[in-house]
Image (cartoon, rainbow, N blue to C red):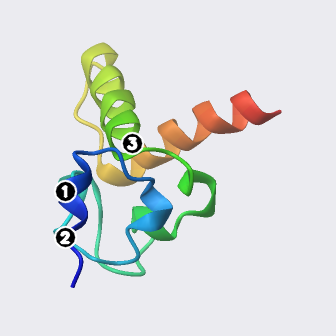
Amino acid sequence: MKNYDLGGGKLKIGDLHQHCGNCKIIELCGEPYSEVCLCTDELLTDVLENEYVSKVEDIRKTAKRNWSNRVLQTLVRMQYVKTYE
C-alpha cells in the first residue's frame, strides 16, 4: 500500500482514495463514505492537503466557537464555490 503521507501534505485530497490515516487531514475527516469523508468530496478533489488544513486553521482562528468537522468542511467548500463562480 502506498504511503500517502510521504507527499508532505502536497497531495490533492482527491488522490487520497480512502487510505484513511495515511494523510495530513485524518483528524478533520469522518468515517469512510460519511458526509465528512473529505477524499470523496468532488468540490475538494483538487485541493492540496496543506491548503485545506491552512483554511481550517484560519477559520478556527477567527471563530468564536469550536466548529465540528462537518461545519469546517462546509465553510471551506463555500470558499471554493465563491472562487469558481
Q: Quadrant of residue 1?
A: bottom left
Q: CA distance from mark 2 to mark 1?
A: 6 Å
Question: Mark 2 sits on what residue?
Answer: 3
- Residue type pointed to by label 1: Leu
Give the numbered dot on residue 6.
1
Question: Mark 3 sits on what residue?
Answer: 72
Q: Secondary structure at mark 3?
A: helix
Q: Secondary structure at mark 1?
A: helix
- Residue type pointed to by label 2: Asn
> Is 40 situated left or right of 52 in this image?
right
Give the numbered dot on residue 77.
none
> Is 80 situated left or right of 75 in this image?
right
The answer to whether marks 2 and 1 mark residues whose Cβ atoms lie closer than 8 Å is yes
Q: Residues within 10 Å of mark 2 (few under 14, many from 20)?
A: few
Q: Nearer the viewer, residue 63 or 76?
A: 76
Tally the numbered discs.
Answer: 3
> Is 35 situated left or right of 42 in this image?
left
- Percent from the top left, x then y, of residue 32? 34, 80
Residue depth check, mark 3 versus mark 1: number of the one nearer the observer: 1
- Percent from the top left, x then y, of residue 23? 23, 59
Relative height, residue 54 to residue 19 (above, below):
above
Residue depth check, mark 3 versus mark 2: number of the one nearer the observer: 2
- Residue type pointed to by label 3: Leu
Q: Going from the N terminus, do you reach mark 3 or mark 1 first?
A: 1
